[in-house]
Image: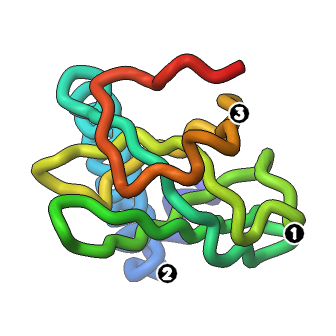
Amino acid sequence: MRLVINYFKKHPYALVMVIVMVVWMTINSIEGAKATKRLTKEGVYTLATIREIKGAKSGRWVKVSFMYDGKQYETEARNETIPLSWIGEKIFIKFLPSRPVEAEYLDSFKVTDSLSQLPPTIWKSIPATK
């Protein structure tokens, strides 16, 4: 313990960085929980097209685009389950109408050919997929 105290006395900026990191992680965690709660309560479903998958060792980032209310939106999220071969494919997403870039990717639901041919459509629940 004394070693840690001496280190922070010698390098006070390190203590500031630790405090900033803890505050940031706390705020990020609280905001993430709020977003999940809002998506559960207010979210709607649509189809999005996978535009880009990038990253490697630290994890993959998947960028999708979708139409809502006559506008095109793009959102990017970390996702380890979507394979690289899905670029150009459609997946279900759940997003907030009040903030469309806040979305959750639902890649475990199959998008049928008939659904993928529909014009931009919004659902309150995921349509039956067989």
Residue 95: x %, y % from top left: 32, 45
Residue contact between numbered discs 1 and 2, judged by CB atoms under 8 Å: no
Give the residue pinned by disc 3.
110
Give the residue pinned by disc 1.
57
- Secondary structure state at the residue bearing disc 1: loop
Disc 1/disc 2 C-alpha distance (Å):
35 Å
Give the residue pinned by disc 2.
10
Disc 3/disc 1 C-alpha distance (Å):
27 Å
Residue type at the position of mark 3: Lys
Query: Which of the pair 23/112 is nearer the observer?
Result: 112
- Secondary structure state at the residue bearing disc 2: helix
| Quarter of the view holding residue 13 | bottom left
Residue type at the position of mark 2: Lys
Question: Which of the two discs, 1 and 2, labels the residue nearer the N terminus?
Answer: 2
Disc 3/disc 2 C-alpha distance (Å):
57 Å
Query: Which of the pair 32/86 is nearer the observer?
Result: 86
Circle 2 residues within 10 Å: few <14, some 14–19, many ≥20: few
Circle 3 residues within 10 Å: few <14, some 14–19, many ≥20: some
Residue 38: x %, y % from top left: 21, 31
